[in-house]
Amino acid sequence: MKRFHIFCFVLLCFAAFLPGCDEPGKDQMYQVSTLQALMLGLYDGDTTVEQLRQRGNHGIGTFNALHGEMALLEGKVYRVDSDGKVTEVSPETKTPFACVTMFEPDVEYPLSGGRDYEQLKTALDAWLPTTNLPYAVRITGTFQYVKTRSVPKQSKPYPPLAEVAKTQPTFEFENVEGIMLGFRLPEYLAGVNMAGYHLHFLTKDRKGGGHVLEFNASNAVVEADDCTGLFLKLPDAKTFTGVDLSEVKEEDIRAVESTTQPASQPTTQNTE
Ligand SMILES: [Zn+2]
């Protein structure tokens, strides 16, 4: 029996290194935690951005204590803080929620002038071959207008995300060059993440950005890459098993991801 256990252990070790078995790489989406857990205030994780970078060169998320919006672009991890400033974070910075992939675009579409976020969604829904796979999406070009938001760093006891979103600072950009990156996820991933589109923005000079609320493209190119696998890293059991995920309401998720009118903070003009 002991010999059998050793055999099983060796087999498992070998399987862990087999290509395709949870291998970081092309077409694998790697996600830390779930959106429902984040909604309930689980704002501290133990995954570092260095670990994220081993899983992808493209992605979005946030940082521990909900300290700003994350954008992983071309291997660099940026924080868009609640004052609108953008900084590259250190490799040991941790995240409670993120979604990344190795971006190797399969398809490319031009996005002509005057297209807004809703029109982009309609166009991409028609262009992409299926709604059943996650797609990593990147939009590069010039934008007549972009409106973004960030989230302020929180202190314990953490309030739920729906409360934080009511005071989110927003930023507006006009005639700006930049890049939007994120995902379009299938309906069946609702709760695990946000179904539909989720994009973060970085200006070309990396001085501004945030979670995209609205935009109007002047001249841009959309690239997309399908994901045929998903690896979900769940939070530490001590916190994750202690929350009631059924408390999260669908309308709260929609409000958090798309609210365009902050309840109490004035809009910050950050035009370039
Ligand atoms: Zn976001």
Image: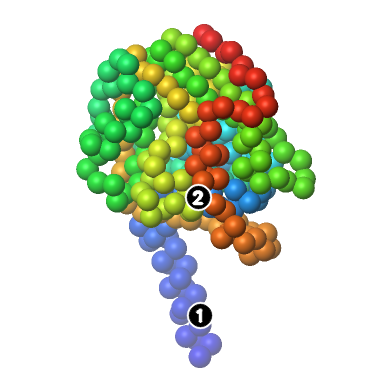
- Give me the residue at 72% from left, 38% from top: 154
Instruction: Report the side of 246 relative to 230 (left or right).
Output: right
Residue 147 placement (x, y as % from top left):
50, 22
Q: CA distance from mark 1 to mark 2?
A: 47 Å
Residue 83 horizontal/vertical position (percent): 66, 22
Q: Rate crowding at label 1 as few (under 14), some (14 to 19) or many (20 or more) other CA atoms within 10 Å.
A: few
**Disc 1 C-beta below 8 A from ligand 1:** no
Give the left or right position of residue 77, taking residue 20 as reference: right
Say whether disc 1 or disc 2 marks the residue closer to the N-terminus: 1
- Quarter of the view holding residue 118: top left
Specify how the rendered protein is coloured.
rainbow
Camera-near label (1 vs 2) is 2
Q: Are marks 1 and 2 in contact (CB under 8 Å)?
A: no
Name the residue tied to disc 2. Answer: 250
Q: Which mark is residue 261?
A: none
Picture coordinates of residue 231, whole percent (x, y)? 44, 55
Q: Does mark 2 have its CB less than 8 Å from ligand 1? A: no
Q: Amino acid at mark 2?
A: Glu
Query: Which residue is nearer to you in this view: 163 or 78?
Result: 163
The correct choice, above or below, for 160 with respect to 224 in the image is below
- Check disc 1 and report the residue beneath it: 6
Helix, strand or loop at mark 1: helix
Residue 186 visible in image: yes
Residue type (three-letter) at the residue carrying disc 1? Ile
Is residue 7 placed above or below 19 in the rendered structure?
below
Residue drawn at 36 percent across, 18 percent down: 217
At horizontal 62% and vertical 61% (from top left) the residue drawn is 244
Query: Can you give x and y, in whole percent of width and height, for residue 254 in the image?
Result: 49, 42
